[in-house]
Amino acid sequence: MSAVSDERAAAPRRGILRLRQETMESMFGYAYTILMTDLLLVLANLPLAVLLLVSRDALQAWPTVLLFSLTLAPSLAGAFEVFRRMRGEEPPRPFAAFWHGYRSRGATAALLGLVTALVIGFVLYDGAILTGTVWAPLLAPTFAVVAAWALVACTSSLAGLVLYPQASVRAIVKAAVYLSVRRWYFSVFALVLLGISAAAVIVQPVLGALVPGLLLYVVFANAEFSFRRAVETEVAER
């Protein structure tokens, strides 16, 4: 009788231990995937990473930084593909997932990144010209909003391209532009995370390179939630 009781008591313990082991393995798997994504982002943007590392004042060299940042959008498509697979049942293979997203959506992402860079470059150039003039206090907030909106819309578009690979690029971009304005609080949240990532990399390029992966995952999850809510709303209205 006591042996049966011992077996019954041991079974839940083994179940708890197994659950804890699976939880720990899952946590380590997520941590490994995030760190690998950080490494792949650095490798995909190596010229930009070297520039930030050797530059004394990256803000003063913004034209060069903006030019080298054209590699960011394709690499974000790769990172978002890794994050998409992380939300599945099977553990992702970071390198394979990153390369798949980079290869399949890299050209479109590069075009979106170019358009965004042109908008931001136009804003920064006009801001530099207007510095010290009477128009600066009036137009500076508008320029800042335009640059921020372009950045958030581009990031949301990249997430949409990964989430809905069968949808047209035009539909994804239109939805991202609409949602970036309609759900402005999500846009502000994403912008804050992107700003923290950029600041960490600019201030301390070596240690800051470990920050973007986790924050970009939150940005991707934020964009995914926004897209899915929009799709659910549209289906419910039909």
Image (cartoon, helix red, strand yellow):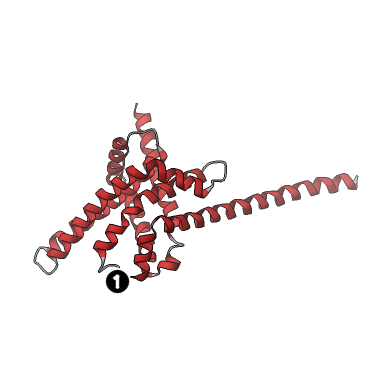
The residue furthest left is 134
The three-letter code of the residue at mark 1 reads Asp
Residue shown at 38% from the left, 63% from the top:
49
Residue shown at 31% from the left, 54% from the top:
70
Is residue 236 placed above or below 209 in the rendered structure? above
Is residue 38 placed above or below 233 in the rendered structure? below
Q: Is residue 210 left or right of residue 22?
A: left
Q: Is residue 27 left or right of residue 65?
A: right
Residue 184 screen position, x and y as percent = 30, 49
The residue furthest front is 47
Residue 204 screen position, x and y as percent = 40, 69
Q: Is residue 167 left or right of residue 92?
A: left
Residue shown at 75% from the left, 49% from the top:
14
How crowded pointer 1 is (Cα within 10 Å; few <14, some 14-19, many 20+) is rated as few
- Position of the N terminus by quadrant: top right
Of helix, strand and loop, which one carries label 1? loop
Camera sees residue 153: no
- Position of the C terminus by quadrant: top left
> In the rendered image, which residue does mark 1 sit on?
57
Residue 206 screen position, x and y as percent = 44, 67
Residue shown at 36% from the left, 57% from the top:
194
Residue 13 screen position, x and y as percent = 75, 50
